[in-house]
Image: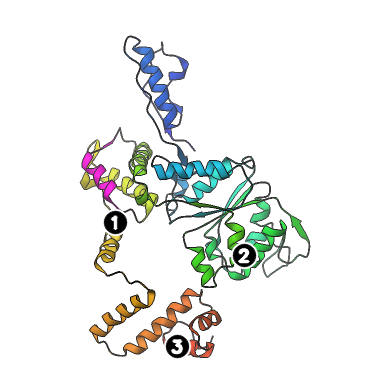
Amino acid sequence: MNSTYVLPDAPASLPPSAEASVTETPLQIAQRLAITFNHVLPDRPAIARTEVPPLLTMPDKRTLTTSIRATVQVFSDPQSLALLERIRMVAPSDANVLVIGETGTGKELVARHVHNLSARKDGPFVAVNCGAFSESLVESELFGHEKGAFTGAFCAKPGWFEAANGGTLFLDEIGDLPLSMQVKLLRVLQEREIVRLGSRRSIPIDVRVLAATNVHLQDAVAAGHFREDLFYRLNVVHLAVPTLRDRPGDILPLARYFIEEYRNRLGYGPVDIEPRAERKLLEHSWPGNIRELENVIHYALLVCRSDSLGEGDLQMSSFGIHAARRAASEPVASTPLEGLEGALRHLFDRAEGNLFEQIEDTVMRVAFDFCNRNQIQAARLLGISRNVLRARLIRAKQISAQK
């Protein structure tokens, strides 16, 4: 979806290309303005066209204002331009793609761009968040179900794979997919067919799968949370989306885009950014990435009382600053055990009561959460029996004694 820019009325003598109140991209506006000025002022030297970086926006982005996803992606920094070139190289193929990046970096926008540059661009693009479904429903959502397959299945329903047939299926947060479903997904990728829940008949599908995650899947494979064969099946093409702090050249173009977007929504006139405010934007670590920058600009426009955003109008999160300070002040442990030893020494200095019990409960709880609350896997990870783990979890009030 392109933004709508309303320009002042043009003189009647201007060419049709310079008419006002049209829906255009920022690049088209810059080019048309240059043509308009050169037409009105023929005796003056031609005005150079404004160089606008490549831009990706989310369709219906105004409905996503409460989402943590990025709604726009700009390619101005060298790292972003390198990513854009890599996308252009791999998109025409039909290979599976794994998109890696922090929350808010624009992974879905990258996936949509891959789809739009592929031979499947006229087919459907279906985005599914794997972490949004319970383990009991995920199979039905992905592969569909037949009538009577489970309580409440009053009619047959196709799944997301069938909905994406002939196009692209984007599996966001693939690391949250339960192990039982990872086996079935691997089979679908290998056989190119699905079986609905409650059916014995296979249905051929023609779908390109793009997956995304904000966790290190290699670590999840090592911990037994993600299947190694599925990882290699998905990771045919690897696209790493850099964080906003790692591509500072994109910060100000994104900020100016959001200023235009939100000032139009709010009915404001042109708004600029003061130099000190620009420096503040460039110096921030942006732990929330593009989504955080969008929120900062939105708030700044709401409180700004002039036609320029000042340093005081920018309300930054202190989360990233505090994390960086902690990392800088604490000695870096060369191994995880050395880090654990340092943490234990801090606890010993505090000399709290029942310290061993607290440490033991913490170890059990963290292992339990790490294994997605699977007692058997957590017990195997710790090298203890399930009964011992269960007793400690009951003591720590992590599970009920009736379970």
The quadrant of the rendering that contains the C terminus is: bottom right
Q: For the residue marked with disc 3, what is the amino acid?
A: Arg
Q: Which residue is denoted by mark 1 in the rendering? A: 317
Q: Which residue is denoted by mark 3 in the rendering? A: 392
Under circle 1, the secondary element is: loop
- Sort mark 3 into few (<14), some (14-19) or many (20+) by Cα contacts within 10 Å: many
Side of 238 where 348 appears, left or right? left
Under circle 3, the secondary element is: helix
Q: Earlier in the sequence, mark 3 or mark 2?
A: 2
**Alpha carbon distance from label 1 to label 3:** 38 Å
**Residue at point 35% right, 71% down?**
334
Q: Position of residue 153 (x, y in %)?
A: 69, 65
274 magenta-colored:
yes
Q: For the residue marked with disc 1, what is the amino acid?
A: Ser
**Residue at point 25% right, 63% down?**
325
**Alpha carbon distance from label 2 to label 1:** 40 Å
The quarter of the displayed image where residue 34 is located:
top left
**Which colour assignment does the render follow?**
rainbow
Eye-nearest disc, 3 or 2: 2
Magenta-highlighted residues: 270-286
Q: Earlier in the sequence, mark 2 or mark 1?
A: 2
Q: Earlier in the sequence, mark 1 or mark 3?
A: 1
Where is 264 relative to 176, above or below? above
Q: Which residue is denoted by mark 2 in the rendering? A: 229
**Residue at point 45% right, 43% down?**
82
- Sort mark 2 into few (<14), some (14-19) or many (20+) by Cα contacts within 10 Å: few
Q: Nearer the viewer, residue 109 or 225?
A: 225
Q: Position of residue 391 (x, y in %)?
A: 47, 90
Where is 340 relative to 159, above or below? below
**Residue at point 24% right, 35% down?**
307
319 magenta-colored:
no
Q: Position of residue 218 (x, y in %)?
A: 51, 65
